Amino acid sequence: MIVTLDTDLVVVGGGIAGTCAAITASRNGIKVILVQDRPVLGGNGSSEVRLWVLGATSHMGNNNRWAREGGVIDEILVENLYRNKEGNAIIFDTVLLEKVRLEPNITLLLNTMVYDLEKKDAVNISSLRAFCSQNSTEYHLKAPLFCDASGDGIVAFGAGASFRMGAEGKSEFGEGFTPTDEYGELLGHTIYFYSKDTGRPVKYVAPSYALKDINKIPRFKNIKTGDMGCNFWWFEFGGRGDTIHDTEEIKWELWSVVYGVWDYIKNSRKFPESENLTLEWVGTIPGKRESRRFNGEYMLKQQDIVDQTHFYDAVSFGGWAIDLHPADGVFSGLPGCNQYHSKGIYEIPYRCFISKDIKNLFIAGRLISASHVAFGSTRVMATSAHGAQAIGMAAVLCLQLGLNPTDFAKTENIKILQQKLNINGQSIPGVPIDQKENLAAEAKIEASSELVLDQIPFDGDWLELKIAAGQLLPLSKDIQYSFEISADVRVTTSLEVELQTSSKIFNFTPDVLIDSQRIELKQGTQKVEISFQNTLTDDQYGFLIFRSNPYVKIRCSEKRISGIVSVYNRSNPAVNNHGKQIPPQNSGFESFEFWCAERRPKGQNIAMSISPALNCFQKDNAINGYTRPYIQSNLWVAEWNDEHPSLTLKWDETKTIYSIILFFDTDFDHPMESSQMGHPENVMPFVVRDYQIEDGAGNVLCAKTGNYHTINKIEFENPVKTRKLKIVCVHPSEKVSASVFQIHIN
């Protein structure tokens, strides 16, 4: 049977990137066909591979504060956390499938492989041909616009778009991290396994193709019975082969490794605790890291990531380390990865998402225009998804405005795209929501209260300074700050205290020393006063740092405050964080300390009195265009003891209101890994769960209970005419005050 379908946009590839592109486009009014050659969505994030979705937050192992990607990918991760904090990959499948099925503008074709295409002319695709093995149906898919998010670039390759495969030489881009031969040309594939305790002894007989000699895996001593799934990310192979055409052979080699490792665990007698374990699941398709990368109007390079290059057409951001792996993968004696970080998140320009050769083709996911070295960072799923959302929105605007994809590389058009993305939660670095179209920005805003932070209450645990700790605070320039903390001291000693900030005001890497003190402490519990003479030269976040001293404990607080977090000079070897980054000479990376937040229930704020008080949670923040902490806190926070926290908007004349968008705090510092890694909470503690909106006559226009999402959009079937709106919130808890990032009214 042959079925012909006409649509506005065809997205090929139902991984995280393709899924987010399709949802974004469909929600903004165009028809989309999403083609996926597998039975579920999610690609490497699905139950077929079971890699957790991750991006700029890097397991909270770097200095990228409040860096979780926004928009649709944020909505998906927040929803998954709410339903699935245990990290069940099967449940994550259902979250993705439901999100797509709920979109009436999406036609989803699962188990459908694109195998051919037709072109209108040399630079435009007219249709695709695909076949579904489950219903023996051939599809002819026609559209004015196409997005290739297929991983290997089946559409872009078939259309003749130019591409790269493998590492560039150092002479081409001058990248200091250009790999040597031992790090090869390509990143390889991985297959995971899961085990389960049955409660009784289970024997295991390995298949004939299982690896017989565990010594062929140089890092076999790292194997532990409690590890499974993503813990074995280093079961990698294929970096010296053709990661497209050799995939089946690579898969068999990885199966050999997995079943051989399980044979070693079960039958070597070195793991008696494995007696009751059974092999519950082994991946049947490999998780693929790298194959083709297509040439766009711009190619992202290592220097762009490390220097945090500003692009006029930024539509996305990344923050994962540049992460290259040894070419021999699991059979290499080298570390499984070679990661180095930048000092903060970096921008990705729109021009990386459009083919320079095919005019009606977008490129998404790991196909985007990046050098092999830069690809070591951009390839991860949350970053891929975030960029793909920009494609979905660009496709909508192309059709609405009669433009081509390349037209949005022009300055006058990119601003339209950036605005539409940001209203949908994209949070493009340095690009606030333009308030010209926001009725809230025309109103006089009154707040029931504003949190003026003169004290972080002294009601929490005692923190022993085994490692250095700090409090990250939004500070103001030209102010001499004083602090008072409570210390419990075992023996007479001294404490080093520093005030630091970042050389780039939007970063959260303390690399500029403002002032320091060495304070003499006596034995016992005492108040400690800290006064700094030097001041910041810009309004930005500062770090009050307490250097390590095992004889000293400092008091913490049970209060959690949006836009404020404690940080620690701790290590996270999983992302090559050993407290300080010391890169190889001439590698193109910088040295700096890591100051990372702790996952709750750890990471209490450090209790302190602050003088002068921080007046950084004002009502006007709710219309400044930023939807997360960036340079400053950017949100309104009510006083803790405010019984009815509210924001009231008043206009001089009656306004007609069609919709209200509220942006709440779902803790963008939390990575929300989608699978395997469980989380203690299913709702972020900062998010306002209950609120209502009233008009000038006191009529309740909307009442919400149990909210857990970042963005709440209230659309009125009949437009509201009023001169006044009141948003009344309920504090999330006794320990967290109500807050709002942004109010956008149309």
Image: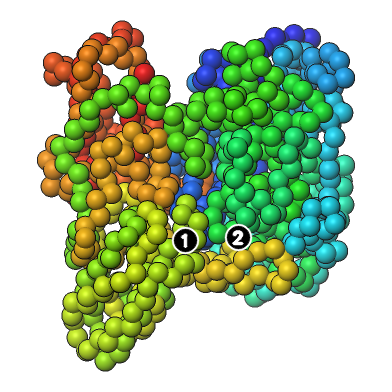
Residue for point 21% across, 60% down:
612
Up/down of 606 relative to 409, above or below: below
Up/down of 407 relative to 615, above or below: above
Which scheme is used to colour this image of the protein? rainbow
Residue for point 62% across, 49% down:
309
Residue for point 55% across, 28% down:
415
Q: Specify the amino acid type for callout 1.
A: Ser
Q: Which residue is mark 1?
A: 502
Comparing 518 with 458, the one in front is: 518
The answer to which quarter of the image holds residue 693 is: top left
Residue 119, horizontal then vertical, whole percent:
84, 16
Give the Cα distance between marks 1 and 2.
Answer: 15 Å
Residue 511, horizontal then vertical, whole percent:
49, 67
Q: Label 1 neighbourhood size at 10 Å, few (<14), some (14-19), many (20+)?
A: some
Q: Which residue is mark 2?
A: 341
The secondary structure type at the circle numbered 1 is loop
Comparing 231 with 733, the one in front is: 733
Residue for point 60% across, 14% down:
401
